[in-house]
Amino acid sequence: MQFFIEVLIGGLLSGVMYALVALGFVLIYKASGVFNFAQGAMVFFAALTFVGFQEVLPGWLGLEAGSNTVFWLAFLLAFIAMIVLGVATERIVLRPLVNQPHITLFMATIGLTYLVEGVAQMVWGANVRGLDLGIVDEPIAWLMDNYEIGVSKFDLFAAGVAASLVALLALLFQYTKVGRALRAVADDHQAALSIGIPLQTIWRVVWAVAGFVALVAGMIWGARNGVQFALTFTALKALPVLILGGFTSVPGAIIGGLIIGASEKLAEVYVGPYVGGGIEGWFPYMLALAFLLVRPEGLFGEKHIDRV
Amino acid sequence: MARKIGDVIVDLQNISLRFGGVKALTDISFNVREHEVRSIIGPNGAGKSSMLNVINGVYHPQEGQIFFKGALRKKMEPHEAAEQGIARTFQNIALFKGMTVLDNIMTGRNLKMKCNFLQHALYWGAAQREEIAHRIKVEEVIEFLEIQDIRKTPVGRLPYGLQKRVELARALAAEPHILLLDEPMAGMNVEEKQDMCRFILDVNDHYGTTIVLIEHDMGVVMDISDRVVVLDYGKKIGDGEPDEVKNNPEVIKAYLGTSH
Amino acid sequence: MFYREAGQFKASYAEDARIFPIRQDRIGFWVLMLVLGVAVPLFSNEYWLKAILIPVLIFSLAALGLNILTGYAGQLSLGSAAFMAVGAFAAYNFMLRIDGMPFLLALVLAGLTSAGVGILFGLPSLRIKGFYLAVATLAAQFFIVWALVKFPWFSNNSSSGVVTAQAVTILGYTFESPEAKYVLTFLIVAFMALLAKNMVRSSTGRAWMAVRDMDVAAQVIGFRLMRTKLLAFAVSSFYCGVAGALYAYTYIGTVEPEGFNLDLSFKILFMIIIGGVGSIMGSFLGAAFIVLLPILLDNVVPALFGDALGAGFVSNFQLIIFGGLIIFFLIVEPHGLARLWQIAKEKLRLWPFPH
Amino acid sequence: MADAMSYLSINNIEVIYDHVILVLKGVSLQVPQGKIVALLGANGAGKSTTLKSISNLLRAERGDVTKGSVEFKGNRIDQLTPADLVRRGVIQVMEGRHCFGHLSIEENLLTGAYTRSQSRAELKESLEKVYAYFPRLKTRRTSQAGYTSGGEQQMCAIGRALMAKPEMILLDEPSMGLAPQIVEEIFEIVKDLNSKENVSFLLAEQNTMVALRYADFGYILENGRVVMEGEAADLRTNEDVKEFYLGLSSEGRKSFREVKHYRRRKRWLS
Amino acid sequence: DEQFIGLPSYRVGPYASGGSGLFGGWIDYMQLVNERDGGVNGVKLTWEECETEYNNARGVECYERLKKKGSTGNSVFQPVSTGITYSVLDKVAQDKIPMVTIGYGRTDAADGRVFPWVFPMITTYWSQASAIVNYMGQKEGGMDKLKGKKIGLLYHDSAYGKESHAIMDKLAAKHGFEVIKIAVAHPGNEQQSQWLQIRQAKPDYVVLWGWGVMNPTAIKAAAKTGFPREKLIGVWWSGAEEDTIPAGPAAKGFVAAGFNVAGANYPVVADIKKHVYGKNKGNMEDKARVGSVYYNRGVVHGIITVEAIRKAQEKYGKGKALTGEQMRWGFENLNLDDARLKALGATGFMPPLKITCADHEGPGKVKFQQWDGSQWKVITDWVESDRPLVRGMIEESAAAYAKEKGIKPRDCSKES
Ligand SMILES: Nc1ncnc2c1ncn2[C@@H]1O[C@H](COP(=O)(O)OP(=O)(O)OP(=O)(O)O)[C@@H](O)[C@H]1O
Ligand SMILES: Nc1ncnc2c1ncn2[C@@H]1O[C@H](COP(=O)(O)OP(=O)(O)OP(=O)(O)O)[C@@H](O)[C@H]1O
Ligand SMILES: [Mg+2]
Ligand SMILES: [Mg+2]
């Protein structure tokens, strides 16, 4: 039982990590109807830029490596880089593709993926780097001692960050004028244009926010597994979360994450051994698929409107 | 030109249809006789389109019964309705945007085509003969509706009015028994409406096709319908011959405004 | 000036329904076929045959398969590589386990196996739409590759999971030289492309497109959603399966499940997008583009920069250009190269008048 | 007309879709301040295209204005974004409704006010005003627009544009799919806005009868060219217009049942 | 004359970091030979890179493209990817180009009688597994002490990872320990459940048979579940700086096998710094990585390539460019004994190596290194593998292949 609980908690916490990445997808999808495949690459780009600045700043400015100043300055610069990326994406990719079918935009973001990956590695090199956020990834001693349940401090921290981001973004979408405009844009680009919603500004803002989310996700995942190309794969973990929760729902991302995380771990531990293990690659997708059969728009997604 | 109006072919009894809290149709009874032109009018949101959707199985009403050719019809799917000879056009044009006019109209004949995909793949013998036989039928429809010159145009590029006409062509290509038309003349000018009326009446005359028509142009409705039913907020407030309806005070109040 | 259809009258609907209604196109097409089928194997060198032409043909076939599903039937799929894997491994096992199995029959059986699996994974499409379906097809991608790795039976217990394709023998002739393999691939691909073209220009194709463009209306007209969608999945997977088998037998020679990864699925998707969604010719143009572009960049970029910049820089620069060009093409013509070709022809027809 | 103070003027524009399809072949027209101008013409004449080239929504459909210019209050506006135009007071109500399906009716209306920075109270007031024009919308305010009837969507689209408090509205087929009563109401609203708030209108309309009744001035477009223009009153009495656009022949209105099997209409041009 | 060497490389994609180190070291060594010695007996080395992105199809294209380059064609093909190895396995024999796969590739190709053109040199995966078990035996104070022990095998769930199964099962049977196989799905950036399973099973050692991001993730997760890093033994694709640095402090104590060691203070590396980087001709963008595990592995690739050229020139004429066929002879008669290694400045850097007609593998030895928090420290001498057992498996597998393909194995007593 205690082992079961441990697996469950571990799963829920990894689910939150997935949600963090899924959030970036949701943001952009909700605001423009674009399924942004480049989100994974953006996570990589953001994290790499952050550690890259962390490395070079001390040399440039004569600051002490690893100091708080360097940390925050690097964070700020990485955020600015993400804003630049967002603005450039809007200008170069999205603006000329207004009102195109969703699949075209989707493909464009795959092109963007290559571009971003290339730029990131061209600027910062292909080296694998560590990233230390100063929070140790080890079990909380008290829980371990008394109940023999390992819950990592780091995971709790990540969960806290994800939860606050989700809360913030959910509020933004539901209750502000900009949030409403974003949803309008997702429904119909041309109509949104016609009533004067400045698509371009909106997209820039959204991509910048998604860039910020990517930065946070990148730092947390990077602190966990190192900052390296494989960060782009986090996207693959986020996709089932996304469809299970619903493409358009911010809370859906986190709930989907929890469900996927927990069931994936339970399945790997309790079912995996019977089929030779390694089922985490496809299990979340199958689970999400089974789920969709019951609710084709995901848990909280918007229903597809089909009227004649 | 003696059209013989026949027996009741579609009979809706006490139909109610709800969407969540919205009552689209409340306890409506209504019938259509063979070979007649039956119109449905009413203010926006009255439930006219919903009514058509009930007839051809897109919506399934919560209450009430539907008799088709005298037999009680259980829950029927749209494609089954099509197999029974019900064709329709849509209020918000539902053409297949990626296809040419010709292909769109050809889809109307799909139920009459018998070859399977393997024969199609080889496109030899039967498949080719079938394709050409149906093409001839489709060309008749094209000629009838006078859209020869846009045959090969992708429908997405056509102006609204022509799209409506192509949609009618697609429905006609199925050689339907009953034709449901949802605002076929919206967005047309008088001359085009006249053309459209001519097509509808011709179909009705020559092929005896039963027509159920939703239209907001009272001139058209009153001129070409045999019987008119009036809906308001999902309820039936009038039913009868055009003149009768036109002078029904409740109808005037709810819909017509002034008597025309 | 010479590209005019003036003076060509179509006397029957059969003529009008031809694949190339304009005579110049027809002539051009047959010339192209002759060049590709005869001149190329005669005059091309080994590198071109083995490293470029054969893969272009095979990927064209896979792209064709995906195009049927996505371009014509409107069901976005990210799992085409997995269906190629099914085809490759099915062909291998049919050849291995049934004595005297003729190659062409194995190819068909491989396609059918793949079609069966395709139908299975196509079932959810009856309820799930758009990107939801796209992501769900990833389940097929990951599951199939996992299963092929996990159960050693598929790879005949090879410790490395890699299987080596058996020799290709048809009627006693063994296809060994690159020229022979190329011709075989070419004939199969050309034949299947013809079949595909026939399907999409007849009622089957119209059913797919109708479902793609507006499924409610398609139903109202009398199409059965389930049958139409599943047929699209089956035919599409059949094509991908055959492409996978050819990949193993006439191209790489040895295959492992992991070779059919998500990247490959994306690559195939690229091909149809760049080439033209819903276009048979687009599948070919797209495949050629995607196969040739990196090779071209490989040759051009270092030549531009020499050794001045690090090798890592060059590789990354190629990646950037690749991504950039994809975006560029989408912007210039969202309907792909096939459309660009069409516009060029339309202009040519009007030339020298602008409109 | 040409010498009237040009408020909105379109000078000899040519529009090409998809690089090859030439649709407008040199269209010029003027809308004087505070007037209602009707743009009439058969299907495919290019009315919608004209409106879209003013509001710059054309580019989103891969169309391009290749010649000519569009001026508003003396400034060229062909290079502005649609959002800029809305801020300057020019808004288009697109043909075919285009409501935001997943937003509720009320949210749809609120997005219309995006370009205006208004206080909550002002916003509420504008909203109420729209509801006053279209009571039907009020009863459906919480439904998702995608699930409302065609007419309701049309009202929603017009109401949404009103929320932007424009000074010039490009209305594309406002009457399409509306019940006759509502059509009259909408034109009354147009008249109202025009006279009370001095909003100018350029409206593309098929319902010639009503349009000419309310408009000050009219243009008739055919095959991408203006073939006739004049005071609305004059057009109403023009014999050709009467016959082809109003369905009135010398003997008065003909029943739709009777007009059959004869007569192809003569074209002014082409 | 010039000797052409085609280099299929990967500098983009998920494995780019390892790739840039490996190809950097390799190219630097060849540059060293050109700069310091003026080539091999006056024959300058030339090379061309071809980006494979670690993708089979692109690898095949590279193979075909490089094959005819240079005056004598490509003289050796080293794909640095097992997938590409398999894809060109048949082609190299037809084209008469030797294929060298150092520490990857097709294991049973070590039987040179069946695979004359393929050289899986220094050590194969099977030798490595056996050496790792021997290392554990050493640690425990004798192989007999392994009896009743539990060894976890955390493997990348792919053909590569599963290559460990057969040999581990055999060794387990032989020494009486239990193997607990735990799969990690690609890419392996999440291992919560695996490590919970490990914690529950409480193995004495865990072998990390990983690749890419799976490695740091495993090390981190080990720390998180409190598994001692000293008992976590990585294979040589899990034991580079790229695997430990991202794991941060958690990696301290982690042990990994390697057929080459890390470190910049070997004469050969010092020479590179002097002659290549001194003249600003180095390939590495980040010079700090000179001497890292992957870099040094590249140097080993370079040494083996160059020494084979040297050997072949002895037979076919000094100062002449060699064909692939001649190179094959060079590889097959390669003998890097202690003296030669010393002359090369690579004593202890790689194991002494002798290739024969029948044995295309060579020593099958590895050293173990431990991460001290900032760098790798060698903690053992060359650890032997269980040669008879491994060789037996190789011959069995190769024979089966020969039978399937109808190959008649060479008779090595007749080769010279
Ligand atoms: N996106 C497009 N691509 C290509 N051609 C187009 C496009 N949009 C419109 N057209 C063409 O431009 C011409 C004019 O169309 P437009 O929509 O402006 O006509 P309209 O006068 O508004 O007609 P309606 O009364 O039917 O709305 C038509 O012939 C149409 O085929
Ligand atoms: N699928 C649906 N889901 C929710 N509500 C619906 C649905 N279909 C119709 N309604 C509602 O039912 C009512 C009737 O709609 P319907 O489309 O039948 O009206 P209509 O009479 O055709 O109006 P119009 O003339 O404006 O087209 C409307 O209020 C509409 O919002
Ligand atoms: Mg309706
Ligand atoms: Mg229009």
Image: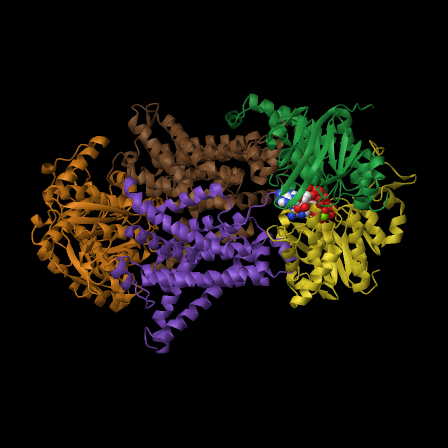
Chain colours: A purple, B green, C brown, D yellow, E orange
User: Where is the C terminus of chain B found, in terms of image quarters?
Assistant: top right
The residue drawn where x is 40% and y is 73% is A73
Q: Would you say D231 lies left or right of B145 here?
A: right
Pick the residue in front: C178 or B211.
B211
Can residue B145 be seen by looking at this rendering?
no
Numbered disc total:
0
Q: Where does the image place residue C89, in percent across and percent down from the top left?
A: 34, 34
Residue at 39%, 54% in the rendered image: A15
User: How far from the left and from the top, in percent, is residue C282?
Assistant: 51, 41
Between B91 and A120, the one nearer to me in the picture: B91
Which quadrant of the figure contains the N terminus of chain B?
top right
Q: Which of the pair B252/A123 is nearer the observer?
A: B252
The image quadrant that residue B240 belongs to is: top right
Q: Is residue D9 above or below residue D241?
A: below
Choose between A302 and D45: the one closer to the eye.
A302
Residue depicted at 46% across the width and 33% down the height: C234
Whether residue B120 is visible: yes
Residue at (23%, 32%) from the top-left corner? E405
Residue at the far top in the pictured view: B125
Horizontal and vertical percent position of residue C118: 43, 35
- The image quadrant where one finds ligand 2 is top right
Query: How far from the left and from the top, in percent, is residue C183?
Result: 40, 32
The quarter of the picture where residue A6 lies is bottom left
From what the image shows, is residue E182 above or below residue C151? Answer: below
Q: Which residue in the rendered view is the most extreme toward the right?
A: D251
